[in-house]
Amino acid sequence: MKLSTDRSTIHLMDPAGTEQKHVSLGQDRVQKVFTSPDGAWSVAIYKIRGVQQYGFIALDLAKCEEQLPVDLPSMASTAAFDQGDIVLFLATGEQRFRLKNQVIQ
């Protein structure tokens, strides 16, 4: 996974470094990326432009697929990957999310 220089596009790469897909966030910008220890998943936390709101997109790196975006009430400071879930530590407390939600077609 690579980010564009303006952090508005996520490029999903194969192991050889060839782009397989890109995910555009429009005017939103990636603030942080957390990657699972096994390298199978990344979670990109982004700031929604014009409002004090954040969101994240889970990225299946093995399949080069993004999952549906999820709204967050605040920025995640850290994350932990646990048995198919991601636990995000937010200013408002910790929240747990399944990594495999419906894939965008």
Image: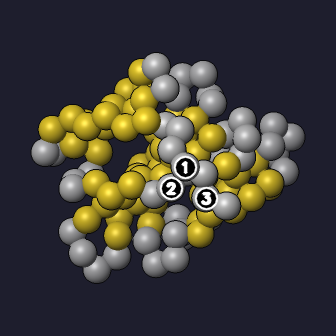
Kind of residue at badge 3: Ile
**Residue type indicated by callout 2:** Leu
Helix, strand or loop at mark 3: loop
- Quadrant into which the C terminus falls: bottom right
Q: Which mark is residue 102?
A: 1
The residue lying at 28 percent from left, 54 percent from top is: 72
Q: In whole angstroms, how far apart are the C-alphas of marks 3 and 2?
A: 6 Å
Q: Which residue is mark 2?
A: 68
From the viewer's perspective, tell me whether residue 98 is left or right of residue 1: left
Depth check, front residue: 5 or 39: 39
The answer for how far apart the CA atoms under marks 3 and 1 are is 6 Å
Q: Would residue 16 appear left or right of 102 to someone viewing this image?
A: right
Instruction: Tell me if label 3 and label 2 are in contact, CB under 8 Å.
Output: yes
Mark with earlier residue (2, 1): 2
Residue at the image position 67 percent from the left and 49 percent from the top: 65
Q: Secondary structure at mark 2?
A: loop
Judging by the rendered image, the residue that carries numbered circle 3 is 104
Badge 3 local density, few (<14 within 10 Å), some, or many (20+)? few
Answer whether labels 3 and 1 touch (C-beta < 8 Å): yes
